[in-house]
Amino acid sequence: MHHLSERNIIEAIARQSRGGPPELIKGIGDDCAVVRKAGGLVDLWTTDALVQGVHFDLAWHPPRLLGRKAASVNISDIGAMGGRPRFALLCLGLPAACSRQLLDELMAGFLEVLTMHDMVLVGGDTVFAGERLMLSVTVCGEMEERHVCYRAAARPDDLIWVSGCLGDAACGLALCRQGLRAEEAYLSLCRAHLDPQPQARLGRLLAQSGLIHAMMDISDGLATDLAHICKASGVGAEIMAPDVPLSPELQKTAPALQLAPLELALQGGEDYQLVFTAPADSSAPLQDLCRGAGRDIACVGRITAGEGVMLCREGERQDITFRGYEHTF
């Protein structure tokens, strides 16, 4: 059976939908579409869907946290461009078995996150969806055109930074699948999967600083999301294995599940941290800026003049280009 990858599908759709009006600055191929408007501002548009049995399991994903996650994963894309999220549309595909209590909890979580980011739900649609619950969210953001951060802006000799520990969400998913969600020792890892925290405010701060070049959020794992930056920018990357930030909880728990912490960090996905590139002379001011915002960032490698993403570990180089989570159909 021939499987289509998400990348192949997007590329095929992009080939068929070329062109657009002059105010369309960026269409398919980045975290958001970018549309110019008056006063030096742009609108940012992004959309994402969560489908029962594919992206979540209601046996262990509480509806309120699912509602929060549906909002957060879209807000993360706005933050990855450096924008401020403003408005949301929500399309709900409801199964016959959906209860009023589930719907109320789902919407409470969704609206909680919108309120945290000073956003408004402005519309949507509700449809019958057979046997599976589905949430499809569209978010519109806004920012100054001159500050937008694109995937295609990385340059050779840039350093590569990430905004936090990686791999926790993938480990949390494994724990949830094994029925260990309620275990106190695993709460932070499970929460990373069930209720990710989008880095929109940090993304906005980084974009406005003028210190960085390319930026993206980490949804499919560093190996894949950094590969998107490299492909768009026409560059390569080297990741130094010892520098990839891993939480103490991940380092303790993953081996007990017979999982490798570094593999989860590189390939697991759903961390919704930021990966960004910056010239080496930005390092000190970048760290000061992020520390002032209460966030630690980690330098994990550098951009090269080659192509693809290489992992450097114990004197060996391994090609990990697009080795993260692969959506197949």
Image (tube, rainbow, N blue to C red):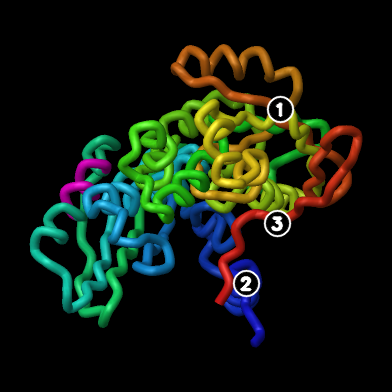
Does residue 242 lie above or below 258 as drawn? above
Residue placed farthest to the left in the image?
100
Task: From the top left corner, tell me how far across and down residue 230 is, in percent.
Answer: 74, 49
> In front here: 35 or 179?
179
Does residue 136 lie above or below 307 as drawn? below
Q: Residue at x 23, y 54 (%)?
A: 63
Tell me the amino acid under the disc marked 2. Answer: Ser
Residue picked out by circle 2? 5
Residue picked out by circle 3? 322
- Number of the front mark, 3 or 1: 1
Answer left or right for 110 relative to 151: left
Q: For the residue carrying disc 3, how many other residues have a C-alpha within 10 Å: few (<14), some (14-19), or many (20+)?
A: many
Which mark is first along the chain, 1 or 3? Answer: 1
Location of residue 241 (image quadrant)? top right
Quadrant of the image containing the N terminus: bottom right
Looking at the rendered structure, the secondary structure element under dot 1 is: helix
State the extent of the magenta-drawn residues as a range.
107-113
